[in-house]
Amino acid sequence: MKKRQLLAAVALMAGIGLQAMAADLNWGTDLPKALAQAKAEKKMVLLDFTGSDWCSWCIKFDKDTLATDTFAAYARTHLELVVVDYPKAKPQSDALKAANKALGAKYKVDGYPTFVVLNAEGKEIGRQVGYAPGGPDAFIAKLKKFNKP
């Protein structure tokens, strides 16, 4: 009986640790900084164009994919993350609004969610427009295909 209790406790602690892992992903807002970091660490940059507080498909993709432990584990070693948010109710500085508007225009984003993947030099190597089913495994498989030479 004690062995079962110990296994249950270990499983619980592991689950808590994994939830914390997904919750503390660092989504920045500064693309030049992310590109510099990506170059230093040989990573890709993932731009998440979202309407985080009003776009139902953005919210669903975030919950189903981006907020999972599986995605967090992949992102930590392969991605620099940049959120380009267009909220309706969340406050943003005028500078951030202007920067997000410029990024949306540069990457010709006209729907949400849109994910743009850049290599460390800043060249677009892939894109996903809209919600895609399949959870983190399907999204990670797509990201890996973008990264092939």
Image (cartoon, rainbow, N blue to C red):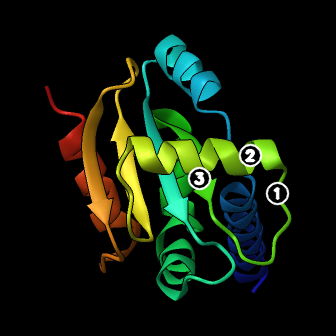
Residue at image mark 3: 84
Residue at image mark 1: 92
On screen, residue 118 versus residue 20, left or right, reads left
Residue 102 vertical position relative to residue 49 in the rendered view, above or below: above
Callout 2 touching callout 1 (CB < 8 Å): yes
Looking at the picture, which amino acid does disc 1 mark? Gln
Residue drawn at x 50%, y 58% as measured from the top left: 49
60, 88: nearer the viewer: 88
139, 95: nearer the viewer: 95
Provide residue 82's location: percent of width, then percent of height: 58, 44
109, 68: nearer the viewer: 109
48, 87: nearer the viewer: 87
Provide residue 59's location: percent of width, then percent of height: 57, 80
Quick one: SS at disc 3? strand
Residue 64 vertical position relative to residue 18 in the rendered view, above or below: below
- Between the residue at mark 1 and the residue at mark 3, the CA separation in whole angstroms equals 11 Å
Picture quadrant of residue 128: bottom left
Residue at image mark 2: 96
Within 10 Å of disc 3 (Cα), the crowding (few <14, some 14-19, many 20+) is many
Q: Quadrant of the C terminus?
A: top left
**Mark nearer the N terminus (1 vs 3):** 3
Residue drawn at x 59%, y 23% as measured from the top left: 32
Residue 126 vertical position relative to residue 17 in the rendered view, above or below: above
On screen, residue 73 versus residue 128, left or right, reads right
Looking at the picture, which amino acid does disc 3 mark? Val
